[in-house]
Amino acid sequence: MENGLYIALLNPSISLVLATAFFALWLYQRRHRHVAVLALGYAAAAGGFLLQYFILPPGFNATKVASNVLFFTTTLCIASAIISRCGRRVPILAFGVLTAGGLGAFCWFMFVDPDLPWRIYSINFALGAMCLVAGAELRAIQGRTAIHRVLLGLALAAGLNFFVRPLLCMYVDGPYETYEGFYRSIYWTTVLLTHAILSIAIALTLIASIALDLIAELRSESETDPLSGLLNRRGFMERTSKILADVERRGVPVSLVICDLDHFKQVNDDLGHVAGDLVISGFAGFLREATAAEHAAGRIGGEEFAIILPGADLTAARLFAEGTRAAFAMLAVEGLPESRRFSASFGVAELIQGEGVAELLARADAALYLAKREGRNCVRVARPSYTRPSAFPRDKAARSTLYGVGGLGNPG
């Protein structure tokens, strides 16, 4: 009797431990709602297994219905949490239909036409279909990671388990007419074993995914400037290094644009540092809207920003900078006087063969230096080789020869 009790408490214990672990994780990261849903799912599994052995006051049949409601809750919660974690929309309608169908069939074969084997089939097939629906959602993910592939495999394994296991057990052990001896049958033994294995496997995979998500978030925070929401200098340099390596393999051009907000100290002096922060965040938001997904923008200094443009040659990058400059000069910054306008200066350089990030940045910075010396609110571009001089040439022709710029920055 004691051995039977230990076996009966095995799955509820495992489920409660996992529910507690996910609940603790959710308390630490409450914005991840799918973690709370996982805690609820494993708690429901514990209740479902306990009700297989302990009878509620309403009676045996009501207890069995309640137990299977909790099993459906478990599958629904875990499947929904996995799908949500992977960025897919939860198929509520499909899950709802399968839950209603499975429980409806179970109740029919419980109260209307009593038949234990068909109760087993109706529950297992509905739960298996829910797992396969979850697997279909995971399979639709583009660019699946290792975590996605493991979760997909587990969803398919769980689905096949619900379909194949009851059929094999019924074939080997014979149909069960009553609940007498049911809990000593091959079917129930495999239920306990497969649930324990799949529960732990899914939980460990999800805990690993949560840990990886947290690491990614911490890394993102370490590479992101909190005021602008763009990459900070470290993050921008690392992203640029990866982009340069990629474009070198593909043999496409890449250009760097550096921009600096004009008279920013005066903005802080006249309007205050809060206004200065609004200008920085407003310009950063403008850059996010102006750049494409393959581009990278960062705040690399106090009021200095940089944008790396893979696939853009010097002409295209200059046009991008000129369009950005003109549009921002007409933009009203939210939270500041409507009549007040701000501007920025731009330096542009295209990567040349054999050049690294530092050299590219130095040439773009030198072009920006020229733009600020020549009146600000303009775009200047860099010839293939120069750095910022220690003494700025007074003669405009000398500056044009040295920096390779003229007018709006024609690279010729």
Image: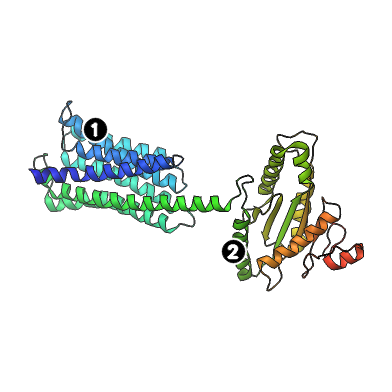
Q: Is residue 202 above or below residue 252?
A: above
The alpha-carbon separation of the residues under discs 1 and 2 comes to: 55 Å
- The total number of labels drawn is 2
Secondary structure under badge 2?
A: helix
Amino acid of disc 1 = Ala
Query: Label 2 neighbourhood size at 10 Å, few (<14), some (14-19), many (20+)?
Result: few
Amino acid of disc 2 = Lys
Q: In the rendered view of the protein, which quadrant contains the C terminus?
A: bottom right
Residue at 15%, 52% in the rendered image: 171
Left-right relation of 331 to 142: right
Q: Position of residue 133 (x, y in %)?
A: 37, 47
Q: As rendered, which of 59 and 19 lies closer to the eye?
A: 19
Q: Position of residue 8 (x, y in %)?
A: 16, 43
Q: Which mark is residue 66?
A: 1
Of labels 1 and 2, the one closer to you? 2
Left-right relation of 202 to 52: right
Mark 2 — residue?
242
Q: Position of residue 235 (x, y in %)?
A: 59, 56
Q: As rendered, which of 319 and 339 lies closer to the eye?
A: 339
Q: Does label 1 or label 2 sit earlier along the sequence?
A: 1
Residue at 19%, 32% in the rendered image: 63
Q: Which mark is residue 42?
A: none
Q: As rendered, which of 387 and 248 lies closer to the eye?
A: 387
